[in-house]
Amino acid sequence: MKKVVKFSKQYDTDMFIIKKNFYLNNDKNLLKKLEINSNYKKQKKRNKCQNCEKKIKVNDFQSFGIDYTICRNCSHLNGKYQNSFKFAYELYKGESSKIYSLNYIRDFKKRVQSIYRPKVKFLKHVIKKNFSITDIGSGGGHFLKACELEKIRATGFETSDYLVKVARKFIKKNKIQNIVFEDINQIIEKNESDCISLIGVLEHLIDPNLAIKSFHKSKSNYLYLSVPLFSFSSFLEHANPNVFPRQLGGDHTHLYTKDSLNYLFKKNKLKIIGEWWFGTDFADLHRTLINNFSSKSSNFFQMQYRKFFLDYINDFQKVLDKNQICSEVHMVVKK
């Protein structure tokens, strides 16, 4: 099977509308992130890499109050503290989950069409045959709805009670189940679908390596995952402490890189059969600039900003995407 490699994704008007919360509520989002970081710093210190499990000692930089170390063995970015079930429950099943779920209700159809349906089409293009899927961490059910529209049999599992309620407004109730964190690996191992999906999930798990091992034990042949990456956006966030960070922070206690993903798959004898590299690094730069501009800027100034930067945001992003150093990647691996 020849590997499918795809680059970039258009950041259009619909995407700006969907992501408008990041632009309009910077101060509120930043405050919430700092609260999460404060809770994260109460966890036990991490003394080995979350990915390759080699000892880590040196702190390479601090951002938003959190120390980070770049693993010298696999290049994985590690936050100073470990994940824990207690921290996960506070983050994904508490009040913050309820607030987060409200964002999922807004623009549901646009999210499905602009964000999730392209993911399903990419997966279909890679696997090239009929398949069923078990989706772990289904959130508000967007990916499941996209699977339904693309005629793919899909069942989802989600830890947030609130998000399950949101999902059931748009998909059949039996298509998504509420679970606890402790059962995730067992669900992965016992499932009988052709493919398991972990979309924006692996980086949130207590032990990602154990999840990969559970996939190996399962009857599934394919694993589809997407993860945020240590990229230009991370450096941008580090340099702008007044702007809400999407990559760095307590909800992302570690970040993958191209090298650390290759290490993970090689270690577990998995073959990469599909890659889609696309990031939002320059959208993040746009958001950072907007939040740093003076509110007294004239309309003419804003026209010049569009002329010199905003009209070319997708062209700039393609440079990072094609060099595989962007803020996100989607991968399909096979046993």
Image: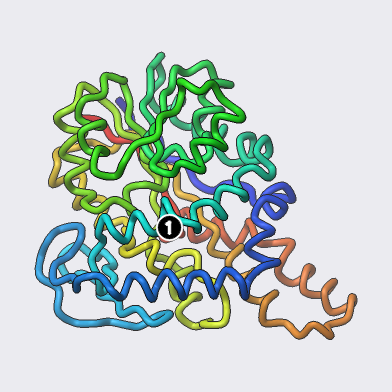
Is residue 96 shown above or below 196? below
Name the residue that disc number 1 marks: 323
Q: Position of residue 117 (x, y in %)?
A: 57, 32
Amino acid under disc 1: Asn
Q: Residue at x 29, y 35 (%)?
A: 333
Specify the quadrant of the image occupied by residue 94: bottom left
Where residue 195 sits, quadrant-wise, is top left
199 vs 297, left or right, is left
Please tell me which residue lies in front, 39 or 21.
Answer: 39
**In which quadrant of the rendered view does residue 307 lie?**
bottom right
Left or right: 16 as drawn, with respect to 178: right
Residue situated in front as seen by the camera: 333 or 146: 146
Asked if residue 136 can be seen in this view, the reply is yes
Q: Residue at x 13, y 67 (%)?
A: 48
Residue 68 x, y percent position in the rendering: 29, 76
Describe residue 217's horizontal placement relative to residue 151 as left or right: left
- In the rendered view of the protein, which quadrant contains the N terminus? top left
Q: Residue at x 40, y 80 (%)?
A: 63
Please name whichever residue, 219 or 323, is drawn nearer the observer in this view of the structure.
Answer: 219
Q: Quadrant of the C terminus?
A: top left
Residue 64: x, y in percent? Answer: 43, 80
